[in-house]
Image (cartoon, grey):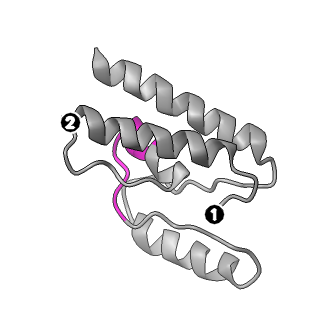
Amino acid sequence: MFSKFRNAQFRKYVQSYFANHPEVRLIVVAGSLSKSSTKEAIGTVLSQKYRIRMHEAAVNTELDMNMAILGIELPADQRGFWAWRRAKRIAQSQAKQKNPSV
């Protein structure tokens, strides 16, 4: 139950992030083959003209995706209240900041 609540919170932060930064674009590579090499190729081409951020780790869950979009690492202690509290503060800050780190 807590994970559904946490996912909903971080989903709202991502929605707020994109609402506050309409210039930011998200490119998603999906499929069963060659995702990493495709992601690297797209990133290489786009980085020649734009500031980009690529998430290095695998993104397998909704929470992973939301955290990656906001540029936040999953807490090492995923059961710890204070670790998630800190991640929530970072997410709130990322959603509101004027100059995104992308």
Circle 2 packing at 10 Å, graded few (<14), some (14-19), many (20+), is few
Q: Residue at x 76, y 48 (%)?
A: 21
- Residue placed most toward the observer, 67 or 93: 93
Note whether 88 is above or below 52 in the view shown.
above
> Which residue is the extreme one toward the top?
1
Which quadrant would the C terminus be assigned to in this image? bottom right
Task: Please report the bounds of the magenta region as a residue range.
Answer: 57-66
Task: Depth check: give the residue in front, 42 or 53.
Answer: 53
**Quick check: 39 left or right of 82?**
right
Q: Residue at left 28%, top 37%?
A: 82
Q: What residue is disc 1 on?
A: 101
Between label 1 and label 2, give the one nearer the viewer.
Answer: 2
Label 2 belongs to which residue?
Answer: 80
Q: Residue at x 48, y 26 (%)?
A: 9
Secondary element under disc 2, as helix, strand or loop, is loop
Rendered location of residue 33, percent (x, y): 38, 62
Residue type, label 1: Ser
In the rendered image, residue 34, in percent from the top left (x then y), is placed at: 40, 68
User: Is residue 33 placed above or below 75 in the rendered structure?
Assistant: below
What is the number of the mark on residue 27? none
- Residue, far right: 23
Q: Horizontally, is 37 left or right of 23 in the view?
A: left
Residue 3 spot, x, y in % from top left: 31, 24
Residue type, mark 2 in image: Gly
Asked if residue 16 lies in the magenta stretch, the reply is no
